[in-house]
Amino acid sequence: MNNQKDPDMMQKIKVRRKPFVVGVMGGHEAPQEILEDARRIGEAIAKRGHVLLTGGGDGVMKAASEGAFKAGGLVLAVLPSDRVRPLAGYPNAFVDIAIYTGMADARNVINAKTPHVMIAIDGGWGTVSEIAHALRNDTPVIALKTPSIGLPHGKRLIASASVEDTLAQLDRLLSKPL
Amino acid sequence: MNNQKDPDMMQKIKVRRKPFVVGVMGGHEAPQEILEDARRIGEAIAKRGHVLLTGGGDGVMKAASEGAFKAGGLVLAVLPSDRVRPLAGYPNAFVDIAIYTGMADARNVINAKTPHVMIAIDGGWGTVSEIAHALRNDTPVIALKTPSIGLPHGKRLIASASVEDTLAQLDRLLSKPL
Amino acid sequence: MNNQKDPDMMQKIKVRRKPFVVGVMGGHEAPQEILEDARRIGEAIAKRGHVLLTGGGDGVMKAASEGAFKAGGLVLAVLPSDRVRPLAGYPNAFVDIAIYTGMADARNVINAKTPHVMIAIDGGWGTVSEIAHALRNDTPVIALKTPSIGLPHGKRLIASASVEDTLAQLDRLLSKPL
Amino acid sequence: MNNQKDPDMMQKIKVRRKPFVVGVMGGHEAPQEILEDARRIGEAIAKRGHVLLTGGGDGVMKAASEGAFKAGGLVLAVLPSDRVRPLAGYPNAFVDIAIYTGMADARNVINAKTPHVMIAIDGGWGTVSEIAHALRNDTPVIALKTPSIGLPHGKRLIASASVEDTLAQLDRLLSKPL
């Protein structure tokens, strides 16, 4: 168990009671520039005292988790796999608490319903499914460099072109009742 | 139970052994023209001896089911609801066999994984999630009057503009190994 | 695809419209005597014109499916796996229509919610989970040679010691409004 | 949002990195004596630095959450409901982080797969399903005053008659590699 093997990870972190949960969704592979965006966003989420939620895998998920983890934030992951049938790369090394579902793609629905705000970064069909589930469930989505989807976006799907803009939108969304 | 109340529905139907399952996905509301497309496609699916799979609700789901049911086809539906917590309109009157999940949006994943071919007609975010899950799972999708999604479509997502074209694509896909 | 490869399986079957769905649940391994019970029950379900639902795997699931299939019945299976990540033995050779979930154990919930009556035969923890989910959802359960569970059984959990008794209870349950 | 309304809940808590997750499962109704057991167990889990996971509802779930929350522990809950279709009593007032699934009973599977150890207290069919799913997935279960289940228990299902015994078993299980 990681619990036993990483005594140096036992440093304490501080979590705000009833924190906001911010989801960061994206592919398990991405260009370096995208990974750096994800890492910076994860770091900024932790510094704001929010909990980070990802799908727990590689690529964008891992980069965001690393950013939050190293900044002392709490990192949750909803995994497609379980302990009996593990999946390579899940959870990544920067996950504090892993939620095991064994439900494969159906865990995308949980990723979409749980966060107070979802940030989608780049991504493929899995990320598109998470955006769609989020919007069906009134979870606001900030889409950073994500493929456009030809549906009326409405006020809950916000396109973003930079980390700075993404964080400004996040702060705006969380500054008022969702 | 419908079983008891509809003796005149007890007429026999014929189902081919190991039939193809064709999914028809779309919104619970749609313009009349779209509903007529859905009805015609359901009818054509039944006449080819395929089993129809829908989400079991109103709108496109009901229109396709009606077309298939009245043509003597077998109509399956994977419902978001269950018997203990029923949802108005589920299953619609043209469902032969209802699969109860109680899983809300997570049933979209089953709708996407089960059919040999999925036909998406019009639709909103729920339909987009089903298209995305299908393409993640290598289920071919014929998209009739569905919003474009700005990702590389690849060979498994086929845009269609008419019922005739949709059926030609369906026959082509099912004529060779999937 | 099986569809193409088994032309001799293309014989027609007859399914009653809005049929009853009877679930048969049990382990993927079982003694020969239990498998023979399962086969006979599957056969009897088909001869009554009901649709058989199983988990689609080996052991009790396969034996019941074989009984129903060879008697000309329609056999459905809700699989824990999907086409992209297939699981050895799923679906077994006697499944007409496979519902792919990819949800591992969560598909047990669907097995429990969908049938009008569930027959549990022998079985391990997976079967116990299906019995528990069924009773939570008011699905009547006939338990044939299944481990007792130390909860008040109530009228919906019926212990049975023989195939004959199981079928008598099934007919009784389906003869009146569920 | 609770986040905004409870500024006095914003006190900081300390969570050990890569903590153990201990699940406490039980019914949404229970006698007072059982609730007191649950509260004491939740409190003890928090004092050991473990994260508490429950189903997020009333009864045993709420009592355990209250015990852990008031002792400064981190309380997670995997809910059957979601924000769009809320369910009365979910999440209870002592949940720090709610995982929304909208999957009804299928969330029991997640409750069973996620914790390093599950403690079942009293409970009905829902709890039985969680015990069964846990044992299918090699999650150790300590069953306090829970109905016996007539299957070979094996080493992973441990009957307990008191809070003290339950905690002794918990400490023993977490003192060695799981």
Image (cartoon, coloured by chain):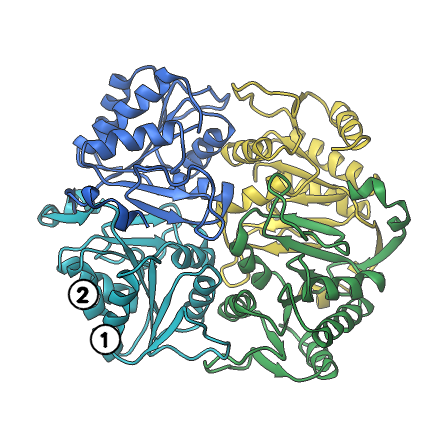
Chain colours: A cyan, B green, C yellow, D blue
Give the residue type that dot 2 points to: Ala
Residue C54 in the figure: left or right of residue B127: right
Residue C69 in the figure: left or right of residue D169: right
Residue closer to the observer: D23 or D176 = D23
Camera sees residue D175: no
* Neighbour tally class for label 1: few under 14, some 14-19, many 20 plus, Cα within 10 Å: some
Camera sees residue D137: yes
**Residue A103 picture location, percent across and down:** 45, 52
Residue A163 shows which numbered tag?
Answer: 1
Q: Is residue D133 above or below residue B99?
A: above
Who's the residue at 78% across and 38% down the image? C45
Q: Is residue A29 above or below residue D39?
A: below
Contact between marks 1 and 2 (CB within 8 A): the answer is yes
**Residue A133 picture location, percent across and down:** 47, 62
Residue marked by disc 2? A44
Quadrant holding the N terminus of chain A: top left
- Give the alpha-carbon distance from disc 1 to disc 2, as whole Å: 10 Å
Q: Hey, which quadrant is residue D21 in on the image?
A: top left
- Under circle 1, the secondary element is helix
**Residue A89 picture location, percent across and down:** 30, 60
Residue closer to the observer: B3 or B158 = B3
